Amino acid sequence: MKKAFRLRVACTGTLLLSLVANSILQAQPTAAAMAAPPATAATPAAPLAQQLDDYVRQYEKAGLFMGTVLVADQGKVVLQKGYGLANRDKGTPNTPETKFRIGSLTKQFTAALVLQLAEQGKLRLDGKVADYLPSYPQPAGSQITVHQLLSHTAGLPDYTALPTFPAVMRSHQEPAQLVALFSGLPLEFAPGTQYRYSNSNYVLLGAIIERVTGKPYAQVFQENIARPFKLKATSLDVVEAADPRRAAGYQATPNGLVPTPPIDLTVPYAAGAITSTASDLYRWSQALDAGKVLTEASKKQLFTPVLKNYAYGWMVFKAKIGAEADTSLIQEHNGGINGFSSFLVRVPQSQQVIVLLDNHNSQSLGELRRGLLRIMHHQPAAAPVSVAGPAAAGAPVAVSAAVLGTYVGVYELSPSFRITVRERAGQLFVQATGQSEFETVAASPVLFSLKGVPAQVEFAKNTSGQVAQLILHQGGAAQRAAKVE
């Protein structure tokens, strides 16, 4: 959550809206995305650890990163370091053991729990929702499978994109209450026919986990993952005791960084409520590689893409890194929630892992991760770009309701990531897939700045004079989204 709950979907270099992503969220990762032309080169004579540290420091100095980084190459940690402050009021620095909210990285843990239960015969991947939650509304309950929930192919509307979500996110929610937010709504497409990232899928998986085990999701996570694999600093946020190692979340404003508004962590639940450290996430990655978490067959399912590069809680794709002739298999996901951004990247063939945990809503983790990968593969890395948008903020301008009405609609940045634009009481609001809604301020009749987010949206017309595109300006990049609804 950003201004509130900000689960991201997996993303490439540019995070959308602080909002994303996610990560995440997001056009799909491609070879071209990994191989974008560099602006500066890493010093080849310097040790790898120094090159990586110098590169992260560029982002820190540019105000684009504040958190913890862990980088492993060939199975060995080469960089593990904190940057900036975990708590600005107390002057507490970020360290390798600082605890961060990880947002949608939670999904890979939920997916692993489901696969473990399938191995134990307690559920089936082809089982229907109604097999485990008999009261789930029909016909969807008998149409949607566990597999489709895991792969975001179920057609469930995303509860974080509902108009009521801003009110919901600040209050305690039981799993059944979260499910009720979307269970009665029409499906967005026939299950299994399309991919569309929806946090509702993983909330429903959490409810199924609780039903088949007879235990709370947090307890199942501790018993089946956290304790066995010694993830001592990893837990569901809502049951975690106060810990001085925890970072505070911040967001950028015209007056500098300020604490993000609170969010009730019962709301993200099995889709995004886990807190962890860089060390624990690396330990988790090692456990997956060692075959300790899942059988080989289940691990293969975890990392096998279904549609649009999405597997079970992971984005999985092949890409060229820099000028390399061969492609590398990339397994990754990102997350974002209420002042925190995260990225976990795995390159299995070279035993490379990147963990990025940020506590000031960084919009640049995708670019940072790309640069670190390039350095690890002996390629030059692009310098960070800190441009927020195409125009400096000025006095708001008045835009008529009639003009605003022409901007209302749905704009698609990728098949898995859309931005919905609404108008209420003479104000324009934007909401991306899996994100909370943001109010905007008009900088011109066609350009709108998002409140509390260093991003702007611009609207463009076609030759017929109709609004046909939204252009997202963020982090020095401009991404075009076609109007589809």
Image (spheres, grey):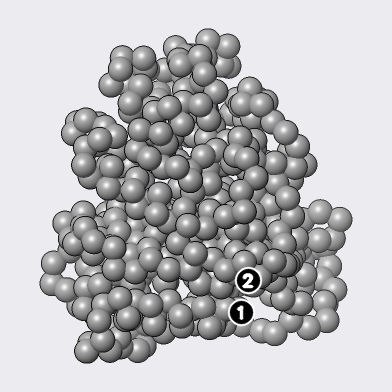
Seen in the picture, residue 435 relative to 360 is either above or below; the reply is above
Please tell me in which quadrant of the rendered image residue 193 appears: top left
What crowding class fits label 2: few (fewer than 14 Cα within 10 Å), some (14-19), or many (20 or more)?
Answer: many
What crowding class fits label 1: few (fewer than 14 Cα within 10 Å), some (14-19), or many (20 or more)?
Answer: some
Instruction: Look at 60% across and 58% down and name the residue there.
Output: 247
Does the CB distance between marks 1 and 2 fall below 8 Å? Answer: yes
In front here: 40 or 219? 219
Amino acid type, label 1: Gly
Seen in the picture, residue 69 relative to 149 is either above or below; the reply is below
Seen in the picture, residue 390 relative to 301 is either above or below; the reply is below
Mark linked to residue 299? none
Amino acid type, label 2: Ala
Please tell me in which quadrant of the rendered image residue 249 appears: bottom right
User: How many angstroms separate mark 1 from mark 2 (CA)?
Assistant: 6 Å
Q: Residue 209, image x and y in percent? A: 47, 22
Is 217 placed left or right of 346 in the picture? right
Which secondary structure, mark 1?
A: loop
Seen in the picture, residue 461 relative to 141 is either above or below; the reply is below
The residue carrying mark 1 is: 389
In front here: 223 or 354? 223
Q: Is residue 247 visible?
A: yes
Mark with earlier residue (1, 2): 1
Instruction: Look at 39% across and 50% down and name the residue there.
Output: 281
The residue carrying mark 2 is: 455
Q: Residue 454, image x and y in percent? A: 64, 72
